[in-house]
Image (tube, helix red, strand yellow):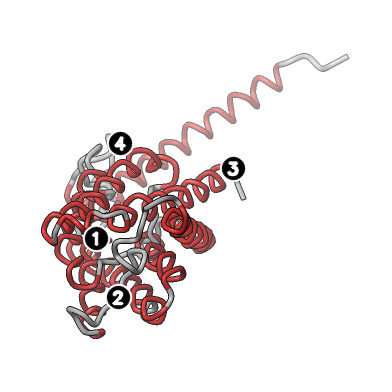
Amino acid sequence: MSPTLVRSVIAEFVGTLLLVFLAVGAAVSGLQGLGLLSGVVGVALAFGLVLLALAYAIGPISGCHINPAVTLGVLLSRGMTAREAGLYWVAQFAGGIAGAALLKLLTSGFGDVTDTTGTLGSNDWGTTISGPGAFVLEVLITMVLVAVVLLVTGRSSTPGFAGLAIGLTLSVVHLFAIPLDGTSVNPARSLGPALFAGGTSLAHVWLFIVAPLLGAVVAVGLVRLITPPVVTEEALREEGADITGAQVPAADGEISSARHAADDALEVDVVAVEADRRQAPPNG
């Protein structure tokens, strides 16, 4: 791997670890104990603020995906190669597991630190929403998140505000979905805690891996549908536009004339060089 890709993979591992440790940890450590409204708001803000900080911290290094669904969206949008995406996924799932392991460690033998969620902040369904309902929910909210990521990081976006938009979007989807299934939108965030929680959380984790990935695919289709096509050279000629600063010929005839003029100039130069060579005295 190139040094740049190595740094990107490390950044994705660390970023996903911190997202799980800090944001899921906000629920595990007791924010839910403040009451339903306060707990949901606190955890939702924790997710959004952590992602906001990481977006500006490691965004210039790896793009700050820290989410396999986002990486899939970028891959399908041709923003990275399949090899790069595979390495990102390995780093993200490993980071999610490492973050959950730290949470498990903290709640297993450090004084009175307890897991207030009872399942290490893992996602599940059944109490409030059914399995099919959770699947549809995760597809839709992941579609929203990934679509926002792709749109605000595109060429026509406002520079410097992508992290803010993405962080706020993550907070909003958590405000909506935490009371329903705990909010995943991130397979790496779901797998890590489920591995340590076991039971139904682990049995149901497949949904929180498959549904967000499907939501990313839907998001890519939506973004392609609502964004304007790339401006081609032919379109620029037809419109007479010049958005790059380069002069674009208005017709093929002008291109042909320019090429002929260049050929004539080159031919003159060749003749002049040949004449100079003939006039020069022989060597020796």
According to the image, label 1 marks what residue? 145
Which amino acid, mark 1? Leu
Q: CA distance from mark 3 to mark 4?
A: 34 Å
- Label at residue 246: 4
- Asked whether disc 3 touches disc 2, contact meaning CB atoms under 8 Å apart, the reply is no
Q: CA distance from mark 2 to mark 1?
A: 20 Å
Q: Is residue 167 above or below residue 88?
A: above
- Label at residue 91: none
Q: Residue at x 30, y 46 (%)?
A: 50
- Asked whether disc 2 touches disc 4, contact meaning CB atoms under 8 Å apart, the reply is no
Where in the figure is residue 274, as x and y percent of width and height?
65, 27
Q: Residues within 10 Å of mark 1 (few under 14, many from 20)?
A: many
Residue 78 placement, left or right of 185:
right
Where in the figure is residue 174, as x and y percent of width and height?
20, 61
Quarter occupied by residue 199: bottom left
Q: Residue at x 48, y 39 (%)?
A: 263
Q: Residue at x 52, y 29 (%)?
A: 268
Q: CA distance from mark 3 to mark 1?
A: 30 Å
Q: CA distance from mark 2 to mark 4?
A: 56 Å
- Label at residue 3: 3
Which amino acid, mark 3? Pro
Which amino acid, mark 2? Asp
Which label's residue is closer to the chain start, 3 or 4?
A: 3
Q: Residue furthest right?
A: 284
- Label at residue 124: 2
